[in-house]
Image (tube, helix red, strand yellow):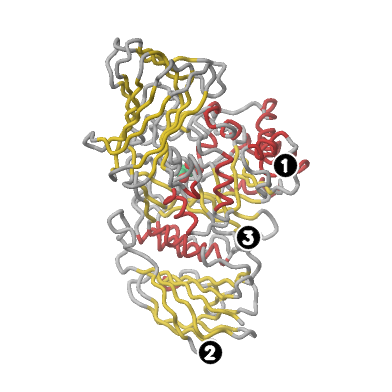
Amino acid sequence: SFKVDLDQSAGKMSRDMWGVFFEDINMGADGGIYAELVKNRSFEFNEPWMGWKKLTKEPEGTFLITNNSKRKGNPRSLKIHNPKGVQLGVQNEGFRGMGIKKGEQYEFSLLFKEASSGMRIRVELLNEEDKVIGSSELTLASGSDWQSGASKFTALETVAKGKLNVWIEGAGDVEVDMISLFPMDTWKNRSKGLRKDMVQLLADMKPGFIRFPGGCIVEGRDLASRFQWKKTVGPIEERELIINRWNTEFKHRPAPDYFQTFGLGFYEYFLMAEDIGAKAVPILNCGMACQFNTAELVPMDELDTYVQDALDLIEFANGAVTTTWGKLRSDMGHPAPFNLEMLGVGNENWGPQYVERLAAFKKVLNEKHPEIAIIASSGTDPDGERFAYLDEQLREMKIDIIDEHYYRPPSWFLSSVSRYDDYDRNGPKVFAGEYASHTTRPNGPGRSTWEAALSEAAFLTGLERNADVVQMASYAPLFGHVDGWQWTPDLIWVDNLNAYGTPSYQVQKLYSTNTGTDIVPVKWNGAAVAGKDSLFASSVYDSITKELIIKFVNYNSKPVQVNFDINSKKKLKQNAMKTTLANGDLSISTSFEEPLKIQPKVEQVNYKGKKIADTFAPYSLTVIKLAVQ
Ligand code: AHR
């Protein structure tokens, strides 16, 4: 039997250990969680008409995309010239169509100027058969300055791949921009907000933190296309879009229309983190483009701008409303600070160039903001090991937290469960910042199966047993859109209407909703339960809820009968909550048709005294929760 020693703490842990990793990959942001339905709303994609179709043949009237470089971040707009007042229109195809729900309200909006008197906009939402399923009209006021217009309407049908017609009616001229359509029913009903179902899946995980905005998009293919947070805040019509680093990345799902419009920008990321009770963990470019692409480097004597971005970000998140960036945060609607505690410098970066740049960031950040912990990248060794030289140098630099990534086969996850058992406790903490078990490596990434998820569950017992040093952990990537993905497996799959969690999601959620403050040793013959007989266990105590929580993985095709003997001076309630995720078939997965094919089964169980004697299902993760009095 196993010994669980509640009287012997194996160290303190962060209650916020389990979090989420957000990157705009697989249409995670644009076309995904950011609920905008119009693609290329401001005609700023490389190909200005991408996503649009003219509905009326010229020369009855003309459409002209103009370019005014004085308009910050958004130089292009559409000029319409219609002297005869014929019906002129454009159609937007959406991001792989528009997901529309019957009975829901939608808000159409645009910017316009110099409208001739009596000009109107009529919008029509179409289903897949081009039938109108919702429409509204808007009269455009005259005036030479840009002004906004909006109209609301209700959809009459549910369609997965709708389209939007925008008709310009009346004779004369008008200039338009930011042609937009959003559902009104967004997360927290925020106007032009986020897709409710997708945020809800994150909120349900009760994540301790959310890391953003990536991932490789932090780095960019080259430095010009790196993620620059300052371009993602302020009025959305002024946010300068860039081509997404994942545009056309993989052969299996090319996405030449994949841009980052930054409607979901840093302010919105911070807000989402706050909404779901997660700490915000931004990662910034360290002066290096993606080393799997151009590996472009900013010269050391030009690194200041990058370091300044970090300082300004701290001011944006935490600064007083009287500071430049704190004021912007306040003007955007959040006078209170966002309480930023940590900041990543570099994503998957390595080599002497990285160390040199990181050191420059660290010097300034430590001097000006000793309260902010710095997360450094451990690079990515193709064998899933750490780069020893880098590890050593990061230690010497006294980096606070090291971000490790591992996309490896299930066998690696099972055999690496002791990865941190002998980790030096006198240095940086670990952020297991991106991981996923890939069932078909090395030939391809594979599906998210129960095999992948259960191997992750086993590995996570190792992270939890070592939670005194593994401070944070997050699966990656987070979202995959069925019609626009570049990378699998992913934690959550979406289409234009629905979203569901994979088996890995269920595992992550069980961990993050059963976290603790103290590591409790679980031993089997005096050693950690780390894979012997394909059994894995970890245990925590939560001093806030006063609960003992045991996690147990049976990676066998047969049930196992197991006893946990609990050593505790405190009294335990007999009535325990037992939550099991199990399936005898490791190849199963979830889908839109069967989103809950694998889901937790919750039971109340009465154990006797300080002994848990139970039988655990084949291929299962079980969480047992006991109240401690
Ligand atoms: O999660 C997908 C990618 O994997 C991330 O962008 C990158 O950091 C890693 O290589």
Q: Secondary structure at mark 1?
A: loop
Q: As shown in the figure, which amino acid type bears the numbered disc 2? A: Gly
Q: Nearer the viewer, residue 33 or 208?
A: 33
Q: Secondary structure at mark 3?
A: loop
Counting residues from the start of the chain, the first of labels 2 and 1 encountered is 1
| Camera sees residue 293 | yes
| Camera sees residue 442 | no
Counting residues from the start of the chain, the first of labels 2 and 3 encountered is 3
Pointers 3 and 1 in contact (CB under 8 A)?
no
Pointers 2 and 1 in contact (CB under 8 A)?
no
Q: As shown in the figure, which amino acid type bears the numbered disc 1? A: Gly
Residue at 57% in and 84% down: 572
Q: Position of residue 629 (x, y in %)?
A: 61, 82
Q: CA distance from mark 2 to mark 1?
A: 53 Å
Q: Nearer the viewer, mark 3 or mark 1?
A: 1
Pointers 2 and 3 in contact (CB under 8 A)?
no
Counting residues from the start of the chain, the first of labels 3 and 1 encountered is 1
Q: Nearer the viewer, mark 2 or mark 3?
A: 2
Residue beneath disc 2: 609
Report whether 544 appears left or right of 204: right
Q: In the image, is residue 324 above or below residue 395?
A: above
Residue at 31% in and 35% down: 125
Residue at 65% in and 77% down: 8
Residue beneath disc 1: 319
Q: Position of residue 182 (x, y in %)?
A: 42, 39
- Quick check: is the Cβ at mark 1 less than 8 Å away from ligand 1? no
